[in-house]
Image (spheres, rainbow, N blue to C red):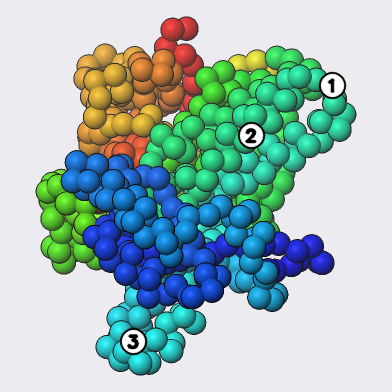
């Protein structure tokens, strides 16, 4: 029994030992463990309440549980031992067994979850401490119960993308709550609430041994539901096609204001404090978030790839928990262990050498020669949109002070945003430098014939989104998805050198470590000059338009 504010609650904790015995060990081991812990008065309760996936979905378990007869043997053992081993419901147990007393439970989950919530460095320290402690059996038994990891909400700090999804959901929820008070009889709000609930499916909010947050289709599904819910609420509020709205709000609850610029077709979420970047780009008509990109970052299980301690492509026998497997779905995944220096978002401003290549940019080994990429920008409203500006230095033998001003203008009823840049250097910058602007997009895969780059410019050869490359003199580039029938295009006022490369992560899944496409990066660049003015139209449209 526990309570909160005087309200009592009956809690049945699952038994950790049973999580590892069932169904990975022989049936007799489970029965022996239960017999060892049973009492003559029959008051002890062993709770087995676990993932159904363990019985046929996790690697090797379909063979072991069904073909080799584990499940049948387990139920037969329960039948054979029913003189002392009783299967009861929670209600039946409560009715015949009085509570021993009151206790208070910490905010926690199962042990692995609390470890996964920690930053990689702290995870490694905890794992090392536990390994050392196990070398001293008595001390381990005394101390291990008190060695805990983090707190589930730490995932929101560990992964900015997780925080974005959660705060996006809360924004929809708050808006819906307000409208339900104003339009209680509107049936569209009931559908909006159903979409909100679908957008709360937990899988993509965190990551551990499963793909979770790393699976781009799961994140896509959550954004789809939340954007669709917003569309319904736009209709309830009768916003129509002619509105443009800007709001400065602490969207991600980090103490800094973000900007949200939207009309009937687009929603743009801006982070002034992180390079004046665009971290979410919603196309309401679809509904689809083009900016649903995941940053490449360090994970503790990457250590196994670096050490070569993995099995590639072999089927497991179903006798290991997924927490014990060390597998990879393909060879040479260690070559993909690249960590991004910042969150991969659009409108990140770069100063790089003109000797840069798509490979050096992909590998994050290209030196950043300006102080703008992660700088704090000042945000203000401008006619038709929002402006962002900052000052910084360009690295050279003698640093050059410079100022960047960028504005985003969104007209009513359109699905494009006009972006204008003005860059001014106090003194002429050194030769051989480029000013570049990062754009990111995620169309779910980089290796499909119906997902590709295209251009209105003559001579550009269509290529898949997973390809690295560089093109000179482009005035237009687009990332196209014929499967979802959407396209994001960029039109430049001056010919640009364009770098492009994919973002592929290596993440843990039920069947081993795997490559997952997280989006692609396009960086249009121009030779750095003392004064520059660049105009870009970012256009989103359906391919059937």
Q: Quadrant of the N terminus?
A: bottom right
Circles 3, 1 touching at the beta carbon (< 8 Å)? no
For label 3, count other residues whose C-alpha is less than 10 Å away and answer few (under 14), some (14-19) or many (20+).
some
Q: Which residue is at the far front?
A: 83
* Image position, residue 110 (x, y; %): 47, 64
Residue at left offset 31%, top offset 89%: 137
Q: Is residue 317 above or below residue 464?
A: below
Q: Residue 208 falls in which quadrant of the image?
A: bottom left
Tell me the CA gap for discs 3 and 1.
Answer: 61 Å
Residue at left offset 49%, top offset 82%: 146
Q: Is residue 13 above or below residue 92?
A: below
Numbered label attached to residue 133: 3
Residue at left offset 24%, top offset 20%: 449
Q: Mark 3 or mark 1, which has the lower sequence index? A: 3
Tag 1's secondary structure?
loop
Q: On the image, numbered disc 1 is attached to which residue?
A: 185
Numbered label attached to residue 196: 2
* Image position, residue 216 (x, y; %): 40, 38
């Amino acid at each position: 029994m526990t309570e909160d504010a005087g309200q009592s609650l009956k809690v049945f904790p699952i038994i950790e030992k049973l999580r590892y015995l069932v169904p990975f060990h022989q049936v007799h081991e489970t029965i022996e463990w239960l017999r060892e812990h049973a009492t003559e008065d029959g008051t002890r309760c062993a709770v087995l309440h676990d993932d159904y996936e363990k019985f046929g979905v996790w690697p090797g378990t379909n063979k072991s549980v069904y073909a080799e007869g584990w499940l049948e043997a387990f139920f037969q053992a329960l039948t054979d031992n029913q003189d002392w081993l009783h299967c009861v419901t929670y209600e039946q147990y409560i009715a015949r067994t009085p509570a021993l007393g009151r206790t208070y439970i910490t905010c926690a989950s199962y042990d692995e979850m609390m470890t996964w919530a920690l930053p990689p460095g702290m995870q490694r320290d905890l794992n090392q401490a536990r390994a050392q402690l196990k070398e001293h059996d008595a001390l381990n038994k005394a101390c291990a119960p008190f060695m805990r990891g983090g707190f589930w909400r730490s995932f929101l700090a560990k992964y900015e993308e997780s925080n974005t999804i959660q705060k996006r959901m809360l924004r929809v929820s708050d808006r819906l709550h307000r409208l339900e008070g104003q339009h209680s009889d509107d049936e569209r709000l009931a559908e909006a609430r159903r979409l909100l609930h679908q957008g709360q499916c937990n899988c993509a909010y965190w990551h551990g041994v499963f793909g979770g947050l790393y699976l781009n289709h799961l994140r896509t599904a959550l954004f789809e539901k939340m954007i669709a819910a917003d569309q319904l609420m736009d209709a309830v509020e009768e916003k129509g096609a002619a509105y443009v709205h800007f709001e400065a709000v602490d969207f991600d609850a980090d103490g800094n204001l973000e900007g949200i610029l939207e009309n009937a077709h687009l929603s743009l979420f801006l982070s002034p404090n992180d390079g004046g970047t665009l971290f979410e780009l919603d196309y309401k008509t679809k509904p689809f978030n083009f900016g649903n990109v995941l940053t490449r970052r360090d994970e503790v299980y990457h250590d196994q790839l670096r050490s070569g301690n993995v099995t590639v492509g072999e089927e497991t026998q179903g006798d290991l928990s997924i927490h014990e497997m060390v597998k990879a779905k393909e060879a040479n995944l260690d070559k993909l262990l690249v960590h991004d220096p910042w969150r991969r978002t659009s409108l990140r401003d770069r100063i790089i050498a003109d000797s840069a290549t798509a490979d050096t940019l992909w590998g994050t080994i290209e030196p950043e020669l300006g102080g703008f990429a992660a700088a704090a920008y000042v945000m203000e409203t401008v006619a038709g949109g929002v402006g962002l500006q900052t000052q910084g230095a360009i690295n050279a033998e003698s640093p050059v002070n410079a100022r960047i001003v960028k504005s985003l203008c969104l007209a009513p009823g359109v699905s494009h945003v006009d972006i204008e840049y003005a860059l001014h250097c106090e003194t002429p910058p050194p030769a051989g430098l480029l000013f570049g602007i990062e754009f990111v997009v995620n169309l779910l895969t980089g290796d499909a014939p119906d997902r590709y780059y295209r251009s209105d410019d003559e001579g550009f050869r269509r290529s898949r989104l997973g390809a690295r490359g560089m093109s000179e003199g482009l005035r237009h580039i687009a990332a196209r998805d014929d499967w979802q029938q959407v396209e994001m295009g960029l039109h430049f006022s001056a010919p640009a050198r364009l770098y492009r490369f994919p973002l592929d992560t290596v993440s843990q899944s039920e069947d081993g470590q795997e490559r997952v496409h997280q989006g692609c990066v396009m960086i249009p660049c121009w030779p750095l000059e003392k004064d520059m003015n660049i105009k870009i139209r970012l256009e989103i449209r359906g391919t059937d338009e």
